[in-house]
Amino acid sequence: MSGGRRADYGRYAGGPDPLAPPVDLREALDAIGEAMRENGRVIVTGCMGKNAEEITRVHPGVLSVTGPHAYEEVVTAVHQVIPKPIIDSHNPLIDLVPPQGIKLTPRHYAYLKISEGCNHRCSFCIIPSLRGDLVSRPVEDVMAEAERLVNAGVQELLVISQDTSAYGVDLKYRTGFWNGRPIKTRMTELVQALSALGVWVRLHYVYPYPHVRDLIPLMAEGLILPYLDIPFQHADPQVLKRMARPAAAAKTLDEIAAWRAICPEITLRSTFIVGYPGETEAEFQTLLDWMDEAQLDRVGCFQYEDVAGARSNALSDHVAPEIKQERWDRFMEKAQAISEAKLAAKVGKVMEVIVDDIDEDGIATCRTKGDAPEIDGNLFIDDNTESLSVGDIVTVEVDEAGDYDLWGRLPA
């Protein structure tokens, strides 16, 4: 591999009481009880929050019970118990989190989660059973968080959720307000508002609804990055049917062509599953043929594995491990060849990159607008980087390409 890149990739316990809660819930209840005995002031949050009635029945003294990723609710509960002092600035000795929130990413980029849960019922996925149906964050809350992040130095917002393009469906696209102006709780209006913050805006996990095409003109205008992360998962209609996903691979090719006609610079990333139960050699070949036509820029691939609680476990004709591995190898060989050709076409072009790191030898690791952190490729600059700092957005000329990475130089 060139450039050193990776190839990209409830049960009840037995016993006398048939009404006893599941083992994982009992363990959680025991942990809550232990915490209650320690100080009597406990806030419960996380995946077990969906069992709020059982938790409060066993431990009526808990202060609050919320579901996973309910950041605002948790902070609100804490401040109700420990009122926040009325001060104008952040006090690290008193405040729970700084104004921009807690970030585990580098200072110059941040993930912006806009919803939780999913309304789809893909047979291989257990997210809806763990996190429930789609729950969109109020648009004013999303914008307030984004503004805080940008004010704290973030140069790139990576918009994420389990189903980003469904944002606002559950709220019937309710109108919210940010800085005194109305904004509908809908993806197109949200990203237009985010673009006003003057930073890169990148969209992840975009389910291929028809209205996604409304985003492409915004990319062509430079309002958001020309990048779509769409998990197609497969291309054969029968496999997609067994996955309980829309079986419209041919129409997807038409959509891709339409997107590229509007925004030729668009980068398309996707993930796929090979060796899905019942996948025949002919069905796998359909996927390879589809890849030849789609010419996706960035691709990840997984070999199917059973997940506890997924409906796909019960499907017949599971594929043998050695066949899954062989298909994965063939798929990634094709994906790598497509990536290599697409990157080779970028040699000689001038493009903007964001600086992610500068090592002790002065080599700068950067990303183009077509590369998300951690999952896509990099662009390396190994000369005249003394003036660069992490988080800078600079213009480079590409002078070399590999299978997954680029190399470039700063203008003289």
Image (cartoon, grey):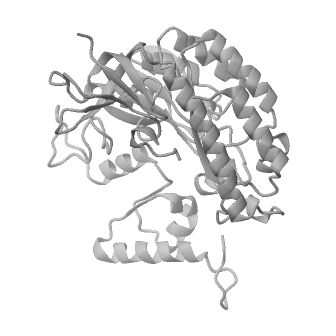
x, y percent for residue 346:
47, 18
In the displayed structure image, the side of residue 112 where residue 104 appears, left or right:
left
Q: Would you place residue 24 above or below residue 371 in this image?
A: below
Q: Would you place residue 59 above or below residue 263 in this image?
A: below
x, y percent for residue 302:
61, 51
Q: Looking at the image, which residue is at 66% across and 53% down?
A: 125
In the displayed structure image, the side of residue 182 where residue 84 appears, left or right:
left
Query: Residue 327 or 366: which is nearer the viewer?
Result: 327
Query: Residue 123 or 81: which is nearer the viewer?
Result: 123
Q: Looking at the image, which residue is at 32% across and 65% down?
A: 41
In what quadrant of the picture does the C terminus appear?
Answer: top left
Residue 262 visible in the shown view: yes
Q: Would you place residue 241 above or below residue 250 in this image?
A: below
Q: Tell me where residue 256 sits by quadrant.
A: top right
Query: Residue 210 or 116: which is nearer the viewer?
Result: 210
Q: Tell me where residue 303 sits by quadrant.
A: bottom right
